[in-house]
Image (cartoon, helix red, strand yellow):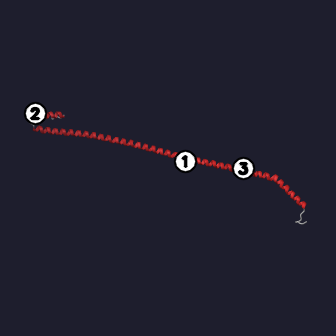
Amino acid sequence: MNIFDFYIPEQILVAFSLIVLMFVLTRILWKPLTNIIDSRQKDVDDMLRSADEAKAIIADMEKQRVNQSAELERLIADKTNEACERAGREYNRIVAEAEEKAHNIVKAGEEKAAREYQRMMSESQEAVIKLALGAAAAIVESSMDSEKNRALIDSMLRKSGMSHG
C-alpha cells in the first residue's frame, strides 16, 4: 500500500478517535485547567485590588504624616516664637530692674555726696567765720579803748556762739 492511498474506514476510525480524545481531553483537562486559570486570575485580581487599596491607605497615611509633620513644625515655630517673646520680655524686665537699681544707687551716691558736701561746706563756713571773728576780735581788741565797744563785741560773740578768751 502506498502512503498516499486512503483507506476510508481507518480514516474514520482515526477521526472518531481524535474526536473522542478531544472530548475526553476537553472534559477531563480543559475545563478544570480553565477553571484553575480563572481561579488564579481571580486571586491575582483580588491581590491587585488589595494592593491598590493598600497603596491608597499608604497614600492617605503619608498625607496624614505630612499634615501632622506640618502641624508639628507650626507648633514648634509657635512655641519657639512664644519662648523668644517671653525671653525678650524677661530680658527687658531684668534690664529695666537693673537700670532702676543702678539709678537708685547713683541717686543715693549723689545724695550722700551732696550731704557730705553740705557738711564740709558748713564746717568750712564755721571755720572761716570763727577765724574771721577771731581776727576781727583781735583787731578790734587791739584798736578799741572804750568799754562800750568792748561790751558790744562781747555781746556779738556770745550771740554767734563764740566768745573770746
Disc number placed over residue 156 in the picture, else none = none
Left or right of residue 102: residue 144: left
Residue 105 drawn at (x, y percent): 34, 41
Residue type at tag 1: Ala
Residue under pointer 2: 148
> Looking at numbered disc 2 in the image, what kind of residue is underneath it?
Lys
Residue located 17% across and 39% down the image: 132
Does label 3 or label 1 sit earlier along the sequence?
3
Reading the image, the residue beneath label 3 is 43
Q: Secondary structure at mark 1?
A: helix
Circle 2 packing at 10 Å, graded few (<14), some (14-19), many (20+), is few
Name which of mark 3 and mark 2 comes first in the sequence.
3
How far across and down, in percent of the image, does residue 119 sit? 25, 39
Quadrant that contains the N terminus? bottom right
Residue of label 1: 70
Q: How many marks?
A: 3
Q: Where does the image place residue 76, in percent across and percent down from the top left?
A: 51, 46
Mark 1 or 2: the one toward you: 1
In contact (CB < 8 Å): disc 3 and disc 2: no
- Alpha carbon of mark 3 to alpha carbon of mark 1: how far? 40 Å
